[in-house]
Image (cartoon, rainbow, N blue to C red):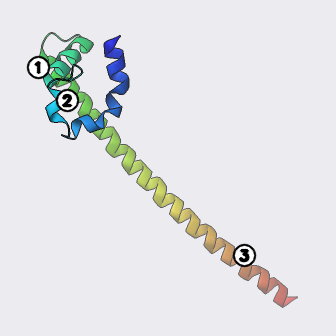
Amino acid sequence: NVPERLQETDDEGIERDSGEGDEESSTNPHHITLSKVIDRCCNHLGASSPHEADAHYRAVCRALVAEAIELSSFLEKVSQGTQELRAKAEASSTDLDKLQFSDWSTE
């Protein structure tokens, strides 16, 4: 049950990584070292060696970064398209207003 609790709270423990309170971390029973993280990753992956787990998680991180870059590029294109559509809508609205005025003036 302890690993489940750690997974639930790890993302909320940013202040643990800030360097503040390092003197307390050596006596803290919940202090986790990098070697413990690597061991847990190996166990989770079912890898026979830390090198195998390291290679797998590096590949996962590379894929995550590639996806983030692709998503960022996509969102930038969506944002540009939205701006262009708004500009075209404003131009169309202005053209319609002019057309309505000219219709009134010719009658």
Q: Residue type at mark 2?
A: Arg
* Residue 69 badge: none
Query: Do the residues bearing badges 3 and 2 touch, measured as CB atoms within 8 Å?
Result: no
The x and y percentages for residue 85 are 56, 63
The answer to whether 85 appears left or right of 100 in the picture is: left
Between the C-alphas of marks 1 and 3, the distance is 67 Å
Residue 58: assigned label = 2
Q: Eyeballing the image, is 56 above or below 12?
A: above
Q: Where 31 sits versus 61, above or below? A: above
* Label 2 close to label 1 by CB (< 8 Å): no
In the image, is residue 6 above or below residue 22? above
Q: Nearer the viewer, residue 92 or 30?
A: 30
Q: Please report whichever mark, 2 or 1, sits nearer to the chain's N-terminal start.
A: 1
The answer to whether residue 30 is above or below residue 95 is above
* Secondary element at image label 2: helix
Residue that appears at 22% across and 11% down: 43
Name which residue lies at 23% across and 10% down.
Answer: 46
Dot 3 or dot 2, earlier in sequence: 2
What residue did someone put label 3 on?
Answer: 96
Q: Position of residue 11 (x, y in %)?
A: 34, 32
Q: Which label's residue is closer to the chain start, 1 or 3?
A: 1
Q: How far is the residue under mark 3 from the one under mark 2?
A: 57 Å
Query: Label 2 vs label 1: CA separation?
Result: 10 Å
Q: Amino acid at mark 3?
A: Leu
Q: In terms of depth relative to the viewer, which is nearer, 1 or 96?
A: 1
Local packing at callout 2 (Cα closer than 10 Å; few below 14, some 14-19, many 20+) is few
**Residue at 24% across / 21% down in the picture?**
30
The residue to which callout 1 is attached is 51
Task: Please name the amino acid that badge 1 sits on.
Answer: His
Quarter of the image where one finds residue 38: top left
- The N terminus - image quarter: top left
